[in-house]
Image (tube, rainbow, N blue to C red):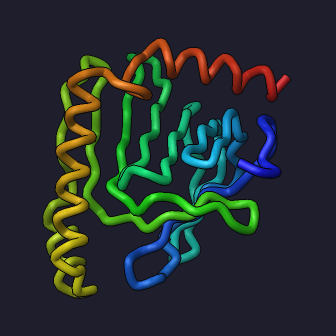
Amino acid sequence: MAGQEPGTSIRIKSYKHNGQLHRIWDDTTILKATSTMVIGANDKTIVTESDGRSWTTREPAVCFFYTKHWFNIIGMLRQDGIHYYCNISSPFVFEEQAVKYIDYDLDIKVFPDMTYTLLDEDEYALHKEQMRYPEVLDRILHNNVDYLQYWIRQRKGPFSHEAIDQWYERFLTYRS
């Protein structure tokens, strides 16, 4: 991605379908950026919620954002193994030194043994009604839930623990 060299610090900003800012991750290091994806990592970064509250992440994380998929993936390195948190979201855009996307509530939590759980279906249903998601968007999002589950089962891309370890090692080279 033009102008975004590895080692550059960016923010991550998530929004809701109605345009309201949802959450900001303050400091993420770019590990790789192309026209179709950004891989970044952070550790103990400040996260600010839409209501102004903030908290600090507890562990290192490697994040994967795509322009051609309606999800993003966060691999969190914890004592008991790699946990993944996957957001069903719009493809990202990059502007104002930030990766930006719309968060569509549905999430998949993946455990180190690669079992997984679909989360927040009630929240999705509520926001779908409140914000009047078009039927075509609903189909796109559910198709991407299925596609993401396929990636998990196949251990494709970020769901290879070795890939997360390699990206984390690269992240450490920028921290020294």
| Residue at image location 40% in from the left, 18% down from the top | 160
Q: How many numbered marks have been drawn onto this rendered protein structure?
A: 0
In the rendered structure, the answer to whether residue 33 lies left or right of residue 158 reads: right
State whether residue 105 is above or below residue 64.
below
In the rendered structure, the answer to whether residue 78 lies left or right of residue 154 reads: right
| Residue at image location 77% in from the left, 36% down from the top | 6
Provide residue 141's location: percent of width, then percent of height: 24, 60
| Residue at image location 28% in from the left, 27% down from the top | 111
| Residue at image location 42% in from the left, 41% down from the top | 73
Give the quadrant of residue 29.
top right
Provide residue 157's location: percent of width, then percent of height: 41, 26
Provide residue 135's location: percent of width, then percent of height: 16, 76
Could you say which is closer to the camera, residue 114 or residue 2? 2
In the rendered structure, the answer to whether residue 169 lies left or right of residue 125 reads: right
Quadrant the C terminus occupies: top right
Given the current orientation, which residue lies at the most extreme top position?
162
Give the quadrant of residue 173.
top right
State whether residue 4 is above or below residue 168.
below
State whether residue 83 is above or below residue 2.
above
Given the current orientation, which residue lies at the most extreme right position?
176
Provide residue 40's location: percent of width, then percent of height: 63, 39
